[in-house]
Every structure is written in structure tokens, then in C-alpha cells.
């Protein structure tokens, strides 16, 4: 793949950690659907980069219209819910695995949502497919916690990632972070606090907090709630 664009504040050489769709020797039905049945709403790695800086055109909305991003849609329950309850906001989902990627966009389409798109890309390389200040709100729910210390370098929330995310978001927008891993929360929260973002919310037990009623419980989240597992949550704003 191409080197990351150079018009971001942090220069680096990094390539997405995923196998390109076009190189797969035996594509599954989900892989085929990405550039077939759902080609108008779903984008593989190559097609996603083409729209960098011009994503709003794919929705037919004005340059000032809000454009939100969910990183890691999973099976797409939150993705479809968000698209349905916020029809005036365009929404992009990002997922690496083909099955949940297709499940996510299929759910949104079944709800009749016209404001949903989804891409297959490595979230640690967001600047490849989004231009500075192209995004509004960003949702990061239950990312891979990489629990072993030797793997912490693979965690999405890193100082460099937050610097890049800041540059891609518009002033006045926020990033939501939610996890079932206490260890990951204790890792991520100080990084958010030391970044350019401003803290708006933080709780070690979302479902016992003042923000519980507005939270959408994902399928993944419900499994942990059944076990009595607390959900850790914070929201940071780009002033």
C-alpha cells in the first residue's frame, strides 16, 4: 500500500496491519459482498483511500454536515442504532473482519438508513483515509485490550494515535471510549488526559453513572453485564 499522506502533524512510516482484499486467494461470501452487493455502501482498503477528504460527497451532503466515525463496529448493533437515531449525521464504520463488516452495513440498510457507510481499514492508520478536520464525533467501543504486557504496543490508544485523531476531528467534536477491560482503561485514561483533548466524562462503572440511561448497550457489552462486569467509560472533547 501507499505511504501515509504527509499533511498530518505527525510524520511517520507505518502500513496497515492487514491483508489486502484483492490478494485473498479464496474469498468468502462476505469478502465478495464487500465489493459486490454492498459496494455502494462498503469500501475495501483501496476504495477507501480514494475518498480521503471527500467522504461527505459519498453521502450527497454539504461540506459542513456532521460526519461521525465508529472504530470497530463488531456485529453492528450500535452502528445501525446510531445511524437510525441520528439520520441527519453521516456515519462511517470501520472494521477489519469481513463478516462483522458486512453484518454491520446490512443491519443499517435493513433499518432503511441512507446515512451509513463502512470501510475495511486499520484504525491505527486513520490518516490514510481521512483528511485533517474531516471527522466529527468518534466512537471507540470495546477495542481489543491486548491483555499481555508484551502486546501493549498493539493497543489502539497510544499517544501518537491520539495526536493523529485530534488532527482529523473538528473543533467541538468528542471521542467516546468504552471498554470492559479495567487494565486497558487504566492505560488509556492517562493518555487521553495528557493529550490535547479535554475531559468531559469519566467513570469506572458506566451502568451506575449519571450517563447510564443514554448508553446504548451493545451485544458484546451485554455479555459482560450478565457476569456483573463493570464497563469503563470516558468522553473527551476537542475544544
Image (tube, rainbow, N blue to C red):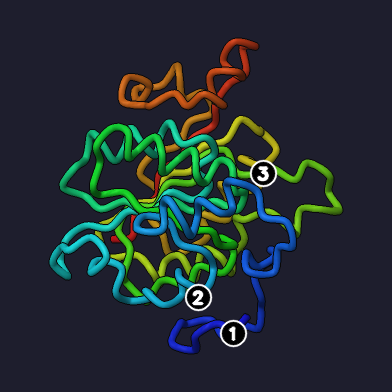
Query: Residue at position x 49%, y 46% from top?
Result: 140
Query: Residue at position x 67%, y 55% from top?
Result: 27
Q: Is residue 116 left or right of residue 150?
A: left
- Tell me the CA gap for discs 2 and 1: 9 Å
Query: What residue is shown with label 2?
Result: 128
Q: Earlier in the sequence, mark 2 or mark 1?
A: 1
Q: Which mark is residue 144?
A: 3
Q: Earlier in the sequence, mark 1 or mark 3?
A: 1
- Tell me the CA gap for discs 1 and 3: 26 Å
Q: Is residue 81 left or right of residue 183?
A: left
Query: Residue at position x 49%, y 38% from top?
Result: 103
- Give above or below for 56 relative to 181: below
Other residues around mark 2 within 10 Å, as few (<14) / some (14–19) / many (≥20):
many
Do the residues under discs 1 and 3 have CB atoms within 8 angstroms? Answer: no
Query: Residue at position x 43%, y 87% from top?
Result: 7
User: Where does residue 45 sit, x and y in percent of width and height?
Assistant: 54, 68
Q: Which mark is residue 24?
A: none
Quarter assignment of residue 53: bottom left
Do the residues under discs 2 and 1 have CB atoms within 8 angstroms? Answer: yes
Q: Residue furthest right?
A: 150
- Which part of the image, by quadrant, shows the C terminus? bottom left
- Which part of the image, by quadrant, shows the N terminus? bottom right
SS for dot 2: helix
Quarter assignment of residue 111: top left
- Give above or below for 150 relative to 4: above
Q: Is residue 142 left or right of residue 151?
A: left
Quarter assignment of residue 171: bottom left
Q: Nearer the viewer, mark 2 or mark 1?
A: 1
User: Where does residue 56 sit, x and y in percent of width and height?
Assistant: 24, 66
Q: Earlier in the sequence, mark 3 or mark 2?
A: 2
Q: Which mark is residue 2?
A: 1
Amino acid at each position: 500500500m501507499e505511504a501515509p499522506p504527509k499533511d498530518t502533524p505527525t510524520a511517520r512510516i507505518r502500513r496497515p496491519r492487514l491483508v489486502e482484499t484483492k490478494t485473498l486467494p479464496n474469498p468468502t461470501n462476505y469478502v465478495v459482498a464487500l465489493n459486490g452487493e454492498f459496494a455502494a455502501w462498503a469500501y475495501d482498503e483501496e476504495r477507501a483511500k480514494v475518498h480521503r477528504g471527500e467522504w461527505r460527497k459519498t453521502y450527497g451532503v454539504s461540506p459542513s454536515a456532521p460526519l461521525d466515525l465508529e472504530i470497530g463496529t463488531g456485529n453492528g448493533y450500535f452502528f445501525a442504532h446510531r445511524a437510525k437515531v441520528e439520520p441527519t449525521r453521516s456515519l462511517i464504520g470501520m472494521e477489519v473482519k469481513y463478516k462483522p463488516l458486512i453484518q454491520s452495513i446490512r443491519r443499517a440498510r435493513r433499518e432503511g438508513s441512507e446515512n451509513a457507510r463502512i470501510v475495511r481499514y486499520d484504525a491505527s492508520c486513520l490518516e490514510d483515509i481521512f483528511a485533517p478536520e474531516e471527522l466529527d464525533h468518534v466512537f471507540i467501543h470495546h477495542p481489543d485490550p491486548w491483555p499481555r504486557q508484551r502486546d501493549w504496543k498493539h493497543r489502539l490508544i497510544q499517544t501518537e494515535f491520539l495526536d493523529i485523531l485530534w488532527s482529523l476531528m473538528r473543533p467541538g467534536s468528542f471521542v467516546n471510549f468504552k471498554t470492559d477491560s479495567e487494565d486497558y482503561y487504566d492505560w488509556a485514561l492517562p493518555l487521553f488526559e495528557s493529550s490535547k483533548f479535554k475531559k468531559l466524562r469519566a467513570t469506572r462503572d458506566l451502568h451506575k453513572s449519571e450517563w447510564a440511561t443514554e448508553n446504548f448497550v451493545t451485544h458484546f457489552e451485554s455479555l459482560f453485564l450478565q457476569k456483573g462486569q463493570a464497563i469503563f467509560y470516558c468522553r473527551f472533547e476537542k475544544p
